[in-house]
Image (cartoon, grey):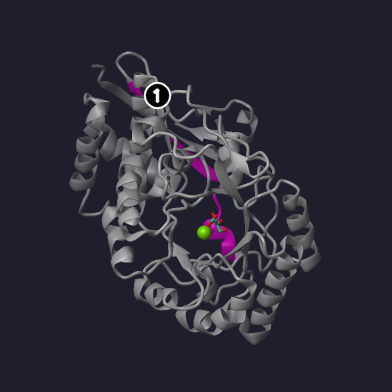
Amino acid sequence: MTKIKSVRTKVWNWTGKTVPPQGSFCTNAGDALYERGDAMGSFRFHQWLTCEIECEDGTIGIGNAALAPNLVKATIDQYLAPMVIGEDPFDYAYLWEKMYRKTHAWGRKGIGMTAISAVDIAIWDLMGKLTGKPVFKLLGGRTKESIPVYYSKLYSGPIDAMQAEAAEAQKSNYQGYKMRFGFGPKDGMAGMRENLKRVEAVREVIGYNVDLMLECYMGWNLDYTRRMLPKLEKYEPRWLEEPVIADDIHGYAELNRGPIPISGGEHEFSLMGFRQLLDLRAVSVIQYDTNRVGGITAAQKINALAEAYQVPVIPHAGQMHNYHLTMANVNCPISEYFPVFDVEVGNELFYYVFDGDPVAENGFLQLDDTVPGLGLSLSDRHLNDFEIEE
Ligand SMILES: O=C(O)[C@H](O)[C@H](O)[C@@H](O)CO
Ligand SMILES: [Mg+2]
């Protein structure tokens, strides 16, 4: 048995080219504030945290996190690393409880749980490498020939540009498309019309034989969503995502009793957080992100609970820490997929930090049964465009 010897965190600060923010790009929780300007500013991912955990035999497992990387780095360095150094990585359930319980006063959600996620993902990558197995083979194995993916971009903008983007994406035979709303309560009835025009326009391009998902990114509220739902029904959305802020669980539950499935979870944390959502029937699709929710250990427990409720799990983002769980669970039908493109909101930054994340082909992606661990390595392809803090 080889024990954990060291934990090395890095914050990768992107200094390269970015696509400038456009107005009405994506509704978000900041829209309720009277300050205007770059409302999406606090929701950009232009930094990423990596966490390398090395064992005595030299094997290194890699975890990651995208939320508040500097604070997550400090949390791991100061609190979590000392808890796991000297321990056996295969005691991963105990190590998870140790991190969870010893930080319980402040760490059960948000930054604390995100830090636990990064350490836990690194431990699972380690266990895969130490056993010579891909992580999904440690979770339940291959449940799909390959993973169907949905195209996730279509941020709100000029209608012709959105239609051109959808037409271009269609050439890759994606199994679904997610678009973002650019208008919300502050934009009144006129904004509602702008939202509806864009849904109509995207449906015109992709048709009605593929799924269309609609993303609000916490930018609407209960009242506005109640008014929008009947107007959206005719476009047959697969789901309406995060219409209200993450804490409005009862608002979710009321909306989810309506005509359109409500999805959420990318801003919820731990098994207990999802138990609340499921008990209240607050969502019809669960979308945790494994690098926020508590890592692979927590995500797999949520998968089991979701299966009991027969609520499908379609994690936020693609990225290997989510793909392995989707491959290993029948109740995880498809994956979100950010196409590779210039750094904009920053979900795509993952491709610049890591090598190994699979590229979708013809609407599906594949995981390799012979590659141990997660199958990721830190990339040196873009080091000139990063300032890395160790
Ligand atoms: O569902 C998503 O992909 C997220 O909400 C995005 O990461 C966020 O950037 C809003 O589009
Ligand atoms: Mg989302």
Residue sitting farthest toward the top: 57
At 47% from the left and 46% from the top, the residue drawn is 66
**Above-or-below relation of 220 to 291:** below
Q: Which residues are magenta?
A: 39-54
Q: Position of residue 383 (x, y in %)?
A: 61, 29
**Quadrant housing the C terminus:** top left
Disc 1 secondary structure class = loop
**Above-or-below relation of 286 to 362:** below
In this rendering, position of residue 375 left or right of residue 381: left
The image quarter in which residue 186 lies: bottom right
Q: Categorize mark 1 by other alpha carbons within 10 Å: few (<14), some (14-19), many (20+).
A: some
Of the pair 229 and 29, the residue shown nearer to us: 229
Q: Position of residue 308 (x, y in %)?
A: 30, 56
Q: Position of residue 153 (x, y in %)?
A: 64, 55
The residue indicated by pointer 1 is 133
Q: Disc 1, ligand 1: is the CB inside 8 Å?
A: no
Q: Position of residue 200 (x, y in %)?
A: 71, 72
Numbered-mark total = 1
**Above-or-below relation of 79 to 158:** above
User: Looking at the picture, which amino acid does disc 1 mark?
Assistant: Lys
At 19% from the left and 37% from the top, the residue drawn is 94
At 28% from the left and 60% from the top, the residue drawn is 275
